[in-house]
Image (cartoon, rainbow, N blue to C red):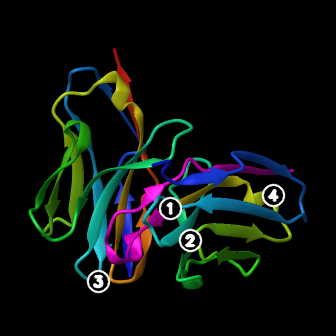
Amino acid sequence: AQSVTQLDSHVSVSEGTPVLLRCNYSSSYSPSLFWYVQHPNKGLQLLLKYTSAATLVKGINGFEAEFKKSETSFHLTKPSAHMSDAAEYFCVVSGGSYIPTFGRGTSLIVHP
Amino acid sequence: DAGVTQSPTHLIKTRGQQVTLRCSPKSGHDTVSWYQQALGQGPQFIFQYYEEEERQRGNFPDRFSGHQFPNYSSELNVNALLLGDSALYLCASSQDRGLLWGTEAFFGQGTRLTVV
């Protein structure tokens, strides 16, 4: 069994400030973890993925995430937000032939 | 490469009707998965097709069925539509079973289904 919880439904930041989107998961096996981004009227785009290699994962557009097994977390960060980062972000846990489970999403709002 | 393409982009149906949604996978991909994304929610896995067979299914009733063709394209059929079936339906393609086995899936832009 597996589940994923995105701890914030909305996160609001100013352009140029750091971004933190939080994700906790539970899994009965070694999971694969993903972050996807969804811009309005667009499909989901992969930002980054963790698949049991390095615990610090770098993705596209300056995003990165750290897998912390002891805390069952996979938080997404970016040092400096851009206006173009405003979108919906989804954390996903999968693997072991269990069906992929998406979080409910975090809406990132970026103020000028 | 056109990526994952879905048709139509928008659809309005009446309760009780049937609907068919279509998906063409990214070139080189052999696996297609379908997801339902209700407003304000994350996508929910409906089922996955690989080698023209349904390989895995989420918690959806039998009113939801699908098909995969020899060219790997896929259809999602929903019978006896309910108001609650209104959602964005996403198709994802991948190699080697994709997210089920922890590898990347590529998503289309989705079909927005409204049931009235």
> What whole-number distance in Å separates the C-alpha atoms at marks 3 and 2?
32 Å
Chain under label 4? B
| Amino acid type at image mark 1 | Ala
Q: Residue A90 carries which label?
A: none
Q: Mark 3 points at which residue?
A: A28
Q: Are callouts 1 and 3 both on one chain?
A: no
> What whole-number distance in Å separates the C-alpha atoms at marks 4 and 2?
30 Å
| Amino acid type at image mark 4 | Leu
| Amino acid type at image mark 2 | Tyr
Residue B6: percent from left, percent from top? 62, 53
Q: Name the residue under label 4.
A: B83
Residue for point 50% across, 61% down:
B92
Query: Can you tell which of label 3 and label 2 is closer to the viewer?
Result: 2
Q: Kindly check if marks 1 and 3 are in contact, taking CB atoms under 8 A apart as contact.
A: no
**Mark closer to the chain start, 1 or 4:** 4
Residue B42: percent from left, percent from top? 50, 56
Query: Can you tell which of label 2 and label 1 is closer to the viewer?
Result: 2
**Mark closer to the chain start, 2 or 1:** 2
Residue for point 36% across, 26% down:
A84
Q: Are callouts 3 and 2 both on one chain?
A: no
- A77 left or right of A54? right
What secondary structure is found at the residue carrying circle 1? strand
What secondary structure is found at the residue carrying circle 4? helix
Q: Name the residue under label 1.
A: B92
- B10 left or right of A39? right
How packed mark 2 is, by other alpha carbons closer than 10 Å (few <14, some 14-19, many 20 or more), is: many
Q: Name the residue under label 2.
A: B72
> What whole-number distance in Å separates the C-alpha atoms at marks 1 and 4?
24 Å
| Amino acid type at image mark 3 | Ser
Query: Can you tell which of label 4 and label 2 is closer to the viewer?
Result: 2
Q: Are callouts 2 and 1 both on one chain?
A: yes
